[in-house]
Image: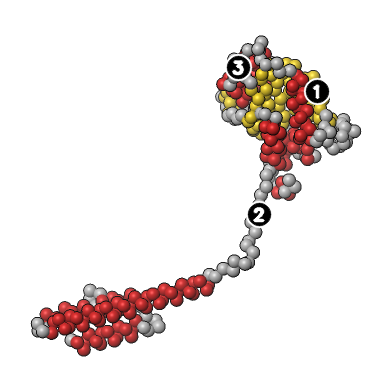
Amino acid sequence: MKEKLSKIRVEALEQINAPDANLEEIKVKYLGKKGELTAVLRGMGALSAEERPIVGQLANEVRESIEAALNEKKSELQAKALQEQLKAEKLDVTMPGTPSPVGHIHPLTRAQRELEDIFIGMGFSIAEGPEVELDYYNFQALNIPENHPARDTQDTFYITDNILLRSQTSPVQVRVMEHQKPPIRIISPGRVYRSDALDATHSPLFHQLEGLVIDKGITMGDLKGTLEVFAKKMFGEETKIRFRPHHFPFTEPSAEVDVSCFVCGGKGCRLCKGEGWIEILGAGMVHPFVLSNCGIDPEEYSGFAFGLGIERITMARYGIDDIRLFYENDERFLEQF
């Protein structure tokens, strides 16, 4: 039996050290439940009492030597495999990486952020509201009666008789006035929706920025001064503004506001169509009915409001002649900005 154990050890070690050794098969063959070493140990019952401890000790030594050889070979193969993997997958960290295209800010977003920075610098805060709005906030609270053209379903996207997609950001002003006591100084930028056919100057979705100031003693002069500062910051220090009488249901008096052409300086050019002026926004003093609807006493407080189209500002500033370019995602257009 001693000779058999020694033979098992020699054969096992030779197989373990063979170049194409399958360690799992060798382990099962010699150390498994039906392995050769196990078979020898099962025959120890036929040995004398004196031989058993000697053979048992030798069997343990054989088992330990085979297990040690298996573990050593396994570690060796793992180390070799790791080296081969590192060699195959080595990375030259000095090589330049694959360039990834980097985007940039959309021209409308750029213009909106610049507008926000200008008005924040004048003490305004930003207010936001829902784009799916109630008829009351979009029309009624703004002194727009039921028979007003702006309420026609051809101009407004109605979801139900009482719910619509807001056609202006003015509802945000109403919501602020309902929940905040004067003084109020806010701007409300955001998307608005109107049922317009898509062409070079119209889109069913566009962006507005409206402003509102409510306090004691606010006059038309405060509105003009605020818009002059805005125009100079946005279009250049030489920019001038002019007011033209107009009508808006929610302001009285109301005006359309033009800026002197920032390309020709008012002399007349292609951008301003030879007029020297570019229309950019509407404005006026908040109508007393609107103040009353929002719980503000028009005898004690007054205020002004203004609204501009961000697309209009951006198109005028960069000489863009088609609003559809903002939404077509054509990289040839967008990369210019």
Q: Distance between the residues labelled 1 and 2?
A: 46 Å
Q: Which amino acid does label 2 sit on?
A: Pro
Q: Give SS at disc 3.
A: loop
Q: Give SS at disc 1.
A: strand
Q: In which quarter of the image is residue 312?
A: top right
Q: Which residue: 71% across, 46% down?
A: 334
Left or right position of 61 against 120: left
Rendered position, 183 above or below 63: above
Residue 61 visible, this orientation: yes
Residue 101 placed where, x, y %? 65, 54
Which one is closest to the eye, mark 1 or mark 2?
Answer: 1
Residue 333 visible, this orientation: no
Q: Within 10 angstroms of label 3, few (less than 14), some, or many (20 or more) residues? A: some
Q: How far apart are marks 3 and 2 (CA)?
A: 50 Å
Which one is closest to the eye, mark 3 or mark 2?
Answer: 3
Residue found farthest to the right: 267
Q: Which amino acid does label 1 sit on?
A: Phe
Query: Which residue in the structure is indicated by mark 1?
Result: 243
Q: Are marks 3 and 2 in contact (CB under 8 Å)?
A: no
Residue 294's label in the rendered image is 3
Q: Within 10 angstroms of label 1, few (less than 14), some, or many (20 or more) residues? A: some
Rendered position, 304 above or below 108: above
